[in-house]
Image (cartoon, helix red, strand yellow):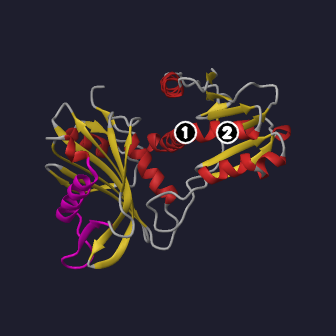
Amino acid sequence: MKTLLKNTALVLALACLVASCADQPRTSKKDRSTGGTSEIMVVTQNDDQWNGRVGDSIRRFFLDYQYGLPQPEARNELAHVKVSGFSDLFKKHKNIIEVEINPNLEKAVAETAENLWAAPQRYIKISAPNSTAWVELFDRQKEVYQQWFDKVERERILSVFRPNKDETIANAIAKKFGFTLVVPQGFYIAKDESDFMWLRKELERSSADIVIYQTPYRDTVQFSTPSLVAMRDNMMMQHIPGPAEGSYMATETEFVPPLVTTVRNFPAGYTEEMRGMWRIEGVFMGGPFVSYTFADSRTGNLVTVEGFYYEPNQKKRNSLLQLESILYSLDFVGE
């Protein structure tokens, strides 16, 4: 179950590891994992490691602010326990990273396991001869660790959403776009046009929204940031009206410029993720959004699935993560 990640051929090793872990079967005998949303359990040998350079490197990365939120919110939460207190209860935590400093080691190595003590779960152990070597290896691989932990978060959320999936909405999406999403009960179809669909879940002070739209795919330049923003603004101006006459949704580009990143673990294959803030033109109103754009070779279209959220004066990280998880549930019909 464990896979050794050596410093040599790091990129290849990590790629192979992701593939092998993804293929591991889920066993029903595993207990359900525990822990708060985006929480990571850090296990150290002593308090000096947690309070020193090793702990600082962990906090600096995992507690960095998530991009595209109106209020500062860390990407993760951290919990800490010493290995002497790492009991069976803590071993059921969904995301665990363990620190080991062993002077007898020649170099730093990392091990990882999926669903070791509970499910879904990701366990990572980094062992090194000293704290300097530990931090160096952590810094080289930390982005992959974050991707693994994010995957567990999405799996946990979808395990709650799947039993409450709205089959009517799923069928409507499948009929129009050729794929399905795990959209839970509570959403409704607010707009359904030839190449655009808008799903909403409205509460007294908040709104969770999903939009799906497509346009003919012609050239890779359509994946550039300016093109993605222009396409989004065009679609939103046409289909998402604001509360005042003549107002409409647009992308905030001045204060929080959209951040576009290539993601290779999205179900549709090569995909561009865009995170940022939306605003209503002519009205003081806005919030965060995340979108995923990919070329559908079956239809020749460029497809975008997006989630955006509105809840003034409240934290939004967890709610946006729920929408992100729904988008990651994308599953092509017939595959």
Horizontal relation, residue 65 to residue 308: left or right: right
Q: In front here: 290 or 203? A: 290
Q: Secondary structure beneath disc 1?
A: helix
Q: Is residue 160 visible?
A: yes
Q: Position of residue 146 (x, y in %)?
A: 55, 42
Residue drawn at the location 63% of the way across and 53% of the way down: 60
Q: Quadrant of the C terminus?
A: top left
- Is residue 176 among what the camera can see? no
What mark, if any, has residue 152 been given in the picture?
Answer: 1
Residue 92 x, y percent position in the rendering: 70, 37
Q: Is residue 282 left or right of residue 329?
A: left
Front of the two marks 2 and 1? 2
Left/right of residue 267 with respect to residue 144 in the rendered view:
left
Q: Position of residue 289 (x, y in %)?
A: 38, 58
Residue drawn at point x = 36 percent, y = 62 percent: 257
The stretch in magenta equals: 224-252
Q: Which mark is residue 96?
A: 2
| 229 part of magenta stretch | yes
Residue 219: quarter of image: top left
